Amino acid sequence: MLSIGDIHVYVSDFAVALRFWCDGIGLTLVEHEPSAACPYALLEFPDGGPGLRLFGGVKPWSEKERPPVGTRPTIRFDVATSDFDGILAAVLEFGGQQVDEIEEYSGMRVVTLADPDGNTFEVVEVPEE
């Protein structure tokens, strides 16, 4: 057997990240360890797939040294949705940002977004079944 496991996202402000991923994107909180040193949460997507594990307490660089979003090495993942416009609006409302222009491929829209820490991911529009 070979499959993808959970996605790990390291964040500097755990409360902001948890709100972004739960309230903004719509993931469900399954586990939560509110440790002061290294808070942790396991989140699930409503329709399945790998879980998203948030780890807090990360200080990757000082604010003056922070590179522009999308310029550092990263692993990206897709968030597939039939509510493209709703997810895009929620990302912007909850502290995320749009990194690139919306593109269209085979009738589906795709856009690269970033969470409040600059972790990038792509939102891909999929038709409702």
Image (cartoon, rainbow, N blue to C red):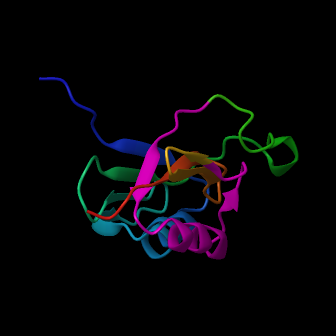
Q: Position of residue 126 (x, y in %)?
A: 40, 56
Question: Camera-side residue: 12 or 114?
Answer: 114
Residue at 49% in and 44% down: 106
Relative side of 48 to 12, left or right = left
Please tell me in which quadrant of the rendered image residue 67 appears.
top right
Q: Position of residue 26 (x, y in %)?
A: 40, 71
Question: Magenta segment: does it hold 12?
Answer: no
Q: Judge from the rendering whether residue 98 lies leftward or rightward of residue 8; answer left or right.
A: right
Determine the image quadrant of residue 8: top left
Of 89 and 56, the residue lying toward us:
89
Q: Quadrant of the N terminus?
A: top left
Taking the magenta stretch, the answer to whether it contains residue 83 is yes
Reply above or below: 4 against 111: above
Q: In the rendering, at what x and y percent does residue 3 appear?
A: 22, 30
In this picture, is 51 found above or below 21?
A: above
Residue 12: quarter of image: bottom right
Q: Residue at x 79, y 46 (%)?
A: 62
Q: Quadrant of the C terminus?
A: bottom left
**Residue occupying the point 45% across, 46% down:** 78
Position in image of residue 74 (x %, y %): 59, 32
Q: Is residue 41 left or right of residue 14?
A: left
**Quick check: 43 above or below 78?**
below
Q: Total of numbered circles in the picture?
A: 0
- The magenta segment: 74-103
